[in-house]
Each structure stands twice: as C-alpha cells, then as structure tokens.
Amino acid sequence: MTTLQLFLQALTLQAGYNSALVAVGAGLLGIAGGGAGAFVFLRKRALVSDAVTHATLPGVAIAFIVMVLLGGDGRWLPGLILGSAASAAIGLMAVEWITARTRLGEDAAIGAVLSVFFGLGIVLLTVIQTMEGGKQAGLDTFLLGSTAGMLIGEAVLIAAAGAVAVGLVVVLRRPMTLVAFDPDYAATLGINVRRTDLAMMGLALVVTVIGLKVVGLILIVAMLIIPPVAARFWTERVDRLILIAAGIGGLSGFLGAALSAAARDMPTGPIIVLVAFALFAFSLAFSPRRGVLASALRHRRFQHRVHLRQGLLAMARGEAIYDRLTLRILRRRGLMRGDGVMTGAGRGAAGKAQLDETRWATARRLRADDPVLERYDGLTPIDQVLTPDQVAHLDSLLPKPEATR
C-alpha cells in the first residue's frame, strides 16, 4: 500500500482504531491550542507559554522516578502528565513571582526559568538512564513527541483532556478577551485580572501537558502561537480570531497525525508543526487584507494612482513626461498616443485633474481649520469629501483651468 493510500485511510479514520484516536486527539489538541493560544497571543504573553512548556521536563522526569521507586510503571501517562503539570505550574508561578517581587522584567524571568528548569530536566533524564530499566523509559519522546507506541488508553486520555480544554476556552472566552485587550476596563467590571491571567496561562498549561506525548515539549508552544498568528491575517474581530485559530490548530493536528500515520518513520510533533507553518505561510501570502500578495497589489494600485495623477497634472501644465511607468499608464488608459500627444480623453482627464487640484488649493486656503480637509492626499477627488453645494461655491470663486475651456 502506497503512502498516499495510507494517508487517505488516516484522513477518513480507516487506518485502525488507534490511528483514528490519535488523529482525533491531535485534532482536539490543536483546537484547544489554537483557542487558548489566541488569548495568550492577544495578551502578548507568548514567551510565558514557552517557559511553561520547557518547565514540564523536570516534572516528567521526577514523576517517572517516583513511580519507579513506588514499584509502579514509570511510563504510566496519567502520572507523567500530573508531574509535568505540577512542574509547569511551579515554573509559571516562578515567572510571576520574579516579575512581581524583583526589578527584573518578564523577559529576564522567562529566560531564567526556562533555562534552569530545562537544564534540571536534562540532568534528571541523565540520572534516569543510570537506573535499571531507565534506558527503555522512552522519555526522550516527550521532547519531540511520538504516537507510534501510544496505547489506546493514552489516546483516549489525550482526546478527553483536549475536549475539556476546548470547553474551558468556550466558558472563559469573555473575561479572557476583556483582560487581553483592556485589563483596567475589565477590573472596573469586577473581573479579577490576576485570576483571569492565571486561568489564561492555566489553559496554556493544560494544552502543554496533554500535548507532550503528541507534539513534545519543545514544539508544543508552536501549537499555541502559530494558529492565532495565522488567524490574525484573516480577521480583526476577536470571536472570529478564536474560531479561525481553533480551526487552523485542529486542522494542523489532524492532518499532521494523518501524515505521521502514513509515514511511520517520521516524528509526529514536527510534522504537525510543519503543517501549522504551511497554513501560516498560506495565510501570510494569500490573506485578502493583510497578506503579502494583497499588500503588493494595493501598493501597485496606489503607485498607479500616483503616477496617473501626476501624469495628468503634467499634461495639464504642458510639461514633458519622462517617467516610463507614467507614460505606460497614460497610454494604456487611452489618454496619450504613442508619440506623446494627448488624446481627446486625455485632455478632458487632465483638465479635471487640474480643476480638482485648484479646488483643493482654494478650499485649504479658505478653510484651513476645517478637519474635513485633512483628508487631502493629492489623490482623492474633492467631490468625495465636500458636498455638491460646497464644491459649487468653490467653483464660483475660481476661473476654469485653460485645459477645460
């Protein structure tokens, strides 16, 4: 069976019960990550989530050691998740404490917590390698994620936790939106800003710990940040941003898990992140309002408007035109012949441009304090700013330009 056939089976949830659960769980994880990450992104606390993700590693290692010492299986996923959650919570509180009680900025606190906790985690993983059976612990999969050896119970746990996280995003969306945009206004409405901030980061923590097995602690922060950043290209409304971010995150998780199931030698976490980045790159390029292509088209249209206006004014004043783009635009619009002579349409358009420029100059001289006239940009016709009566009054104060006689 080819890789494409395996991928299509995984997409339609026909590649086996375990693969289907992993795909659904990864999709729910992506939805929760995109939704929770939208608030983290709007609150401008993306780096805090990075510190939280790296702070999970010592918790995973300590949980493994404790479960082994108690005679249990150190690879029991619920225990590892509880350990990582406790460690990440301590890391989050450490960042909050350093920021609130010292003169260090949040970026310095994040750097300190991130490096110390991750370094401690690496040391503990080295200690685990010296333990009996430690070499087969498989904890390295928590760095980059792996679903190849995932048990059905683990997949169910991840899917259920992802669903709970999605529900929390829906329930807490209003207070978190208010705090993300205007914490002072939120406080006047009786919202506890500190608790809401902690709930926001708590959601990021939940997504982090349930995503360790799928994406890994190094890359899970991408599931919190990339979807809302990509969604920002498509909308300026918060409710739509959350929905689009959740959709991008869910699609990234589902497609990434399906690709991982089809190409079994490829790591799951990096594939999911690459799919998310592909969706981000598509948004960056093709978003109709903020995309690179749309911006380039707007710039090109604006450039053509400027050259057309300046070309018409030069024609009205009888000045020679040497700019190639200006000449090309005038000829393409039928305002100038190939030998540089104005056409009839060109004389009319030039006269209108000169009249409009004269009207603007007169209006700005007579009504210098009128805020409406601040819209003058050298391109907008004055009849789009003033009323017909106002334009008629201006016309009564000035002679017609020669080009229009």
Image (cartoon, rainbow, N blue to C red):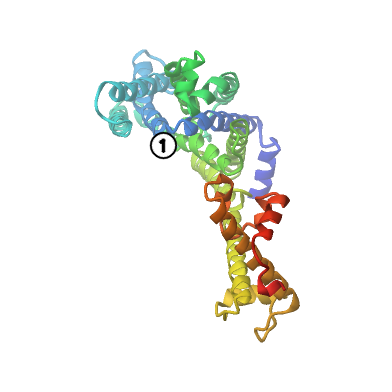
Q: Is residue 251 visible?
A: yes
In the foreground, 102 or 83? 102
Q: Is residue 49 left or right of residue 277?
A: left
Q: Quadrant of residue 130?
A: top left
| x and y percentages locating residue 23 in the rendered image | 61, 34
Residue receiving disc 1: 218
Task: Please tell me which residue is depicted at 37% across the width and 28% down the height of the picture.
Answer: 57
Q: Quadrant of residue 299?
A: bottom right
Give neighbour class at mark 1: few <14, some 14-19, many 20+ (Cα, 10 Å): some
Task: Please tell me which residue is depicted at 60% across the width and 79% down the height of the picture.
Answer: 318
Specify the amino acid type for callout 1: Ile
In the displayed structure, 68 sits above or below 317; it is above
Q: Spot the residue most to the bottom.
A: 339
| x and y percentages locating residue 170 in the rendered image | 60, 22
| x and y percentages locating residue 146 in the rendered image | 49, 35
Q: Spot the residue most to the right.
A: 344
